[in-house]
Every structure is written in C-alpha cells, then in structure tokens.
Image: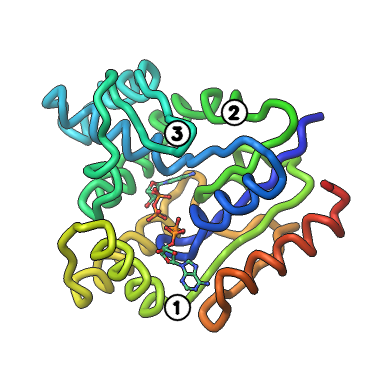
Amino acid sequence: MIPVITIDGPSGSGKGTLARRLAEQLGFHLLDSGALYRLTALAAQKRNIDLEAPEVAAVAQSLNVRFDPDGAAYLDDACVDSVLRTEQTGAMASKIAARPDVRAALLERQRAFATAPGLVADGRDMGTVVFPDAPAKLFLDASAQIRAERRYKQLIENGLSANLAALVEEIQARDDRDRNRAVAPLVPAEDALVVDSTHLSIEAVEARMMEFIRAQGVV
Ligand SMILES: Nc1ncnc2c1ncn2[C@@H]1O[C@H](COP(=O)(O)OP(=O)(O)O)[C@@H](O)[C@H]1O
Ligand SMILES: Nc1ccn([C@H]2C[C@H](O)[C@@H](COP(=O)(O)OP(=O)(O)O)O2)c(=O)n1
C-alpha cells in the first residue's frame, strides 16, 4: 500500500506550502488537487463553455495537463501558471467543484498520483473522499482575516494585484461555498489532526505535522 499524507483545509490555510515542504522532506510525490479544479475551469472558459453547462464534466475528464517538477502547470502545452493562481480562477474552480459530475470525472486522475515511494495530497476532500484510507490525515485552518492577509502578501510578492478588503470577502464566500456544498464538503476527516496555524509559523506547523506523521508510522 502506497503511503498517502492528506492535507485539507480552507483557502490560504497553508496547504500548498506545507504539502511542498513535506513532499520535499520525505521524497514523496505531490498532488495539488485544487490545480485540477482550477485547470478544468480555465479549460472550459477557453472553449467558451458556460461553467454550469453539462459539457464541463467532459472537459474535466479529458483535461490535457502536465506539471513541471517545480509545480508549474501546463494546459494544452501552454504554461498557465500565473492565471491559475488568481482569486478569480479560484472562485471559478470553487463553483465547478460543487458539481458531482465534475468531482467524479477528476476522482481517478487524482488517485493515480499515489505511486511509490508515497504521496502528499492537498485539497478539500483528500482525507474524506479521495484517499479515505490514508494513514496520516491533516486539516489546516486559520482565521479568515489571517488567511486573507497571507494571500494578499503572496499575490503582491508574485507581482499580481490585490485588494485586502476584497480578498477577505472572496475568501469567506469561497469558504461558505466549499463548506456548504452537498458533495464532498470541506470538513476534517474524523481521524484527521486539525492544526490551527493562526498563531503558528510555517516551521512550527511543519514540526507539528511531522510529529503526527511519525506517530502514525508513515515514516
Ligand atoms: N503558518 C504560516 N505563517 C505565515 N504565513 C504562512 C503560514 N502558512 C502559510 N503561509 C503563507 O500563506 C500564503 C498562502 O499559503 P498557501 O500554502 O498557498 O495556502 P493554501 O494552499 O492553503 O491556499 C503563502 O504565501 C504562505 O507562504
Ligand atoms: N480537493 C479539492 C481541491 C479544490 N477544490 C475546489 C474548492 C476550492 O475553492 C477551489 C480551489 O482550490 P485550491 O486548493 O487551488 O485553492 P486555495 O489554494 O486553497 O485557495 O477548488 C475542491 O473542491 N476540492
């Protein structure tokens, strides 16, 4: 059985950062499942398909994507990394992610990332739906205000424009949609360790996660 470490949580809670650091430390593969939802939304937009149209599930099923070793994403062989990470794309991803047909279309593609020596997978339903038997499940959280501030800093550092007040609202709207949808809502798995990083540094969060991963016997 391939060891899988799942990291779920709301937007800006640090999933991607911690998933990358843990994967590097352990030599495991990485699955950024949110990128698949973002790429599906972008692919539908590119083909002029309405995000509510039934065709979006077929777009998800036939997605032509690849990731560089450094995580850069390519859609139909074009690098889409900068547009992929915008809040607008995140909001579109959250909308199509509420659709059961889209989630079903992406399920096996996500499971296929679990190859030796192991996988760190981040998203919303990694521990509850995609990898329910994972030996180490983590759920990251932080206050909406802190998450918006971190996201603001990150966007500015990446040369993108951002407005803090708008980000707080967007993050709350996305949280509400992701938490309250009928299918695979954002919720910690029963056996997940919940880490609130509001007052913790990245290093402190990583140390706590590694302690749990070791205690679960994954490494
Ligand atoms: N504990 C923390 N303390 C300070 N900054 C953090 C912490 N965790 C994450 N960050 C920063 O917050 C931003 C958003 O983190 P990210 O990993 O992209 O979140 P997510 O993948 O959950 O949306 C990044 O710039 C990251 O460096
Ligand atoms: N496993 C997943 C991953 C993402 N999603 C949806 C819900 C999220 O709001 C969007 C974007 O996710 P992503 O993880 O890329 O976003 P953040 O980095 O957390 O802001 O996709 C999901 O429903 N299930």
Counting residues from the start of the chain, the first of labels 2 and 1 encountered is 2
Name which residue lies at 51% across and 46% down: 184
Badge number at residue 113: 2
Disc 2 + disc 1, Cβ < 8 Å: no
Amino acid at the residue labelled 1: Ser
Which residue carries the number 3 mark? 103
Counting residues from the start of the chain, the first of labels 3 and 2 encountered is 3
Q: CA distance from mark 2 to mark 1?
A: 31 Å
Name which residue lies at 36% across and 25% down: 60
Left or right for 50, reference 15: left
Counting from the top left corner in percent of width and height, residue 62 is at 36, 16
Amino acid at the residue labelled 3: Arg
Amino acid at the residue labelled 2: Phe
Name which residue lies at 29% across and 25% down: 75
Disc 1 + disc 3, Cβ < 8 Å: no
Tell which of 90 and 21 is nearer to you.
Answer: 21
Decide: few, some or many residues near mark 2? Use Cα within 10 Å; few <14, some 14-19, many ≥20.
some
Counting residues from the start of the chain, the first of labels 1 and 3 encountered is 3
Q: Quadrant of residue 64?
A: top left
The yes-or-no answer for disc 3 within 8 Å of ligand 2 is yes
Mark 1 against mark 3, which lies toward the viewer?
1
Q: CA distance from mark 3 to mark 2?
A: 16 Å
Q: Quadrant of residue 211?
A: bottom right
Q: Quadrant of residue 116?
A: top right
Left or right for 107, reference 211: left
Tell which of 184 and 151 is nearer to you.
Answer: 151
Q: Say which element carries label 3.
A: helix
Which residue carries the number 1 mark? 143
Q: Say which element carries label 2.
A: loop
Q: Say which element carries label 1.
A: loop
